[in-house]
Amino acid sequence: MPSSDRIPHVVIVGGGFAGLWATRALARDPVRITLVDRGNHHLFQPLLYQVATAGLSAPDIAAPLRHILRSQDNVEVRLAEVQGIDTAAKTLALADGTSLGFDTLVLAAGATHAYFGNDHWAAHAPGLKTLDDALLLRRKLLLAFERAEAETDPEKRAAWLSFAVVGGGPTGVELAGTLAEIARHTLRSEFRNIDPALAKVRLVEAGPRVLSSFPDDLSEKARRQLQKLGVEVQTGTPVADIDADGYRLGDQRVAAKTVIWAAGVAASPLGALLDAPRDRAGRVQVEPDLRVPGHPDIYVAGDLAAIQSAGQPVPGVAPAAKQMGRHVATSIRARLRGQATTPFAYRDFGNLATIGRMAAVVHFGRLKLSGALAWWFWLIAHVFFLIGFRNRVVVLLNWTMAYWSYQRAARIIFGPPLDAEPVTKPTSEEPDAPRIG
Amino acid sequence: MPSSDRIPHVVIVGGGFAGLWATRALARDPVRITLVDRGNHHLFQPLLYQVATAGLSAPDIAAPLRHILRSQDNVEVRLAEVQGIDTAAKTLALADGTSLGFDTLVLAAGATHAYFGNDHWAAHAPGLKTLDDALLLRRKLLLAFERAEAETDPEKRAAWLSFAVVGGGPTGVELAGTLAEIARHTLRSEFRNIDPALAKVRLVEAGPRVLSSFPDDLSEKARRQLQKLGVEVQTGTPVADIDADGYRLGDQRVAAKTVIWAAGVAASPLGALLDAPRDRAGRVQVEPDLRVPGHPDIYVAGDLAAIQSAGQPVPGVAPAAKQMGRHVATSIRARLRGQATTPFAYRDFGNLATIGRMAAVVHFGRLKLSGALAWWFWLIAHVFFLIGFRNRVVVLLNWTMAYWSYQRAARIIFGPPLDAEPVTKPTSEEPDAPRIG
């Protein structure tokens, strides 16, 4: 119990699932919370691929943290970037030059994509973790079809119509399936010089199968559903190189002007600011109650935490992050009351991944679904979990209309231009046309 | 009539109201059309201020040109930037290095904002013409409140809560009215250190009254409605200077970290590529049938054209651009048939401007409305004219929910960060709080 009437200050870094759920779970506790995030919004990351593929607008899957927490009086939301952690003085150094003291720190800064030491691939194969990533990918995808339409050299045109997604996890599978749908249906009859349906979409996975967190038979069903949507699945060989014109797979060189990286995840660099053990992905190896070894007032939750539950590593998925966030809140409450903390136990409610139109796989205990039924299951679960009533309605409306029309509402290119590349000039000038009038 | 069976090639530059309406009006004519635009979308510019003020998403008010025109077989849409016009050879030079020949050219490249020779103001007072402009303004507006929340120096905090809109035309009035609503209602109870309702919103107009294209009494009503919404209206003095911290009005210096430019419009620089007379705003002075003097196969339409109708200059509004676009199509058709062209006559259907929640002015012939009735009129007219069924539904839905909740759905900050400015450190460190547990 606090020895004075000053209220303990809990600083939570990161407004994702772990940080936001911890914040909300502490709503009635005698603490003062500061929630620090670099962005002003909570992002519903499971639908980020829909923003990248122009199905949803950025605001459809994001809600301002201030707005979500407006009625929770014990929270102050701070838009700021953390640059340093002084564990002895118990202060954070922020990028705006100020510092922020804490009694208890909850580090829930999540993860970013990683290139396994091949950082030069980043320029050619962007990943998908933030709204800005999604809008960059959207620009890249839409512009590739525009470039193909303008290009007169057949080989270069084919390269603009060649897309590759590296990484056969849920994000890679979603992106590849949706890309194939865009090429085959959404853009049909909109171009005059190219047939978008001839676009090649390849999904490259180093391991033996896609969706490796699912049982073998569901992986196989996912692969078949991808192929039915028009995706070529390349498993068993890791990507050896990526440049501006394509990638190399063993000895095979594949031309592709658009490569998307969905293969590697690394923990936020903020984990390195603690003197604590970390795993290969940079995640902080926490104690069973999610506290950092040697730092009894510092918790790590969400994708930044490496922890086992029932002998299995806890996966980096939204439900696990929410559960960790709530567990941290329970632990803080217990300590305020002078009680002991309990170890975190992950409740695995199952695993689901969408692939494309009417295509998904679901694995809940002994229940295994694939195809249309799994897709409906996935749809309902995701709309249900979207934060904010308005977003749910808008997302459902967009999806309903997209489903019937094959259209995608957010096919708008904006933002900084990508590198301009000259198109190949036609080899012969077209003959003069007659004058009008 | 063409002397051979080659189909005449009409190149239309700009997919705004003028260019798109010209394109669609030529759907059944024996021409081959290439519509060239730097962006991939038609933009419903009258609602752009709603994107800037976080009420709507960018895709809500934009539709891909390819999609709009997918069924019009005589059109090819080309995403490209025009860099040169060779009127003798009848070719356009494009930024991607290719050239595009034409038999008839329709230049409908619109207008951009202008700073009357004070281009250094652009960095401090961005304008509003494109989606990128709107998203930049949104970032600026939302970040100003965040900066105020983090700032501890009272004077600097007040400057972050001081907003100015320069220019009392329809865009300036809409922006100022909406900003006042955001400060007073939308952000209520979301901040802990500031009261957003104390924000100052000023509308600065050099002329004697706001909305000068309306009759005196409606201008006066607009001014009173703005004041009721909390906007301070400063008329009669031009802005003398703008910098990063505010602006000068005669001898008066006003601190304002956020200044928005809605005062000046200049025609697209493409007009200067023709050897044709131009007015002070850079608009091409066209002949009565919208052709360029000395260039019988080149038309200019929309905001880029300077023309009189019934002795009055045609205003730079969407209905005028649409009418010009259709007139160009009629003229091209007449010449194909060997008939004479007719002069353009502007049909003025009236004038309407929105100010804020339940506040607008409408002037249709002898009908003058203001307040709630005018607002409903404005709402119905704008939703009706929005292109694309889906957009109408989404926009209506967003507005209905925004109206009841005072909320704005698109309050998401993304895109490149603005210049970081350090906040003032608190003068005294807060005392140590007790430890938890």
Image: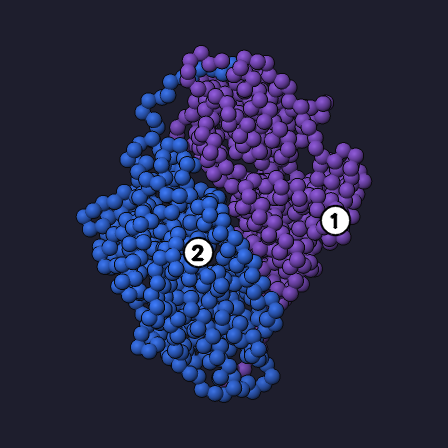
Chain colours: A purple, B blue
> Does the rendering let one see residue B234?
yes
Q: Quarter-wise, where is residue A325 in the image?
A: top right
Q: Please state if A162 lies on the left or on the right of B400 as rendered.
A: right
Three-letter amino acid code of the residue under disc 1? Ala
Whether residue B147 is situated above or below residue A52 in the rendered picture: above
Disc assigned to residue B48: 2
Whether residue B8 is situated above or below residue A194 in the rendered picture: below
Name which residue lies at 65% across and 47% down: A175
Taking the view exactly as shown, the residue that stands out farthest to the front is B373
Q: Quarter-wise, where is residue B85 in the image?
A: bottom left
Three-letter amino acid code of the residue under disc 2? Leu
Q: Chain ID for label 1?
A: A
10 Å crowding of disc 2: few (<14), some (14-19), many (20+): many
Which element type, helix, strand or loop, lies under badge 1? helix
10 Å crowding of disc 1: few (<14), some (14-19), many (20+): some
Q: Nearer the viewer, residue B106 or A395?
A: A395
Tags 2 and 1 both on a single chain: no
Whether residue B304 is situated above or below residue A180 in the rendered picture: below
Disc assigned to residue A372: 1
Which element type, helix, strand or loop, lies under badge 2? helix
Q: Nearer the viewer, residue A22 or B237?
A: A22
Name which residue lies at 63% across and 48% down: A259
* x, y percent for residue B130: 44, 56
Disc 2, disc 1: CB below 8 Å?
A: no
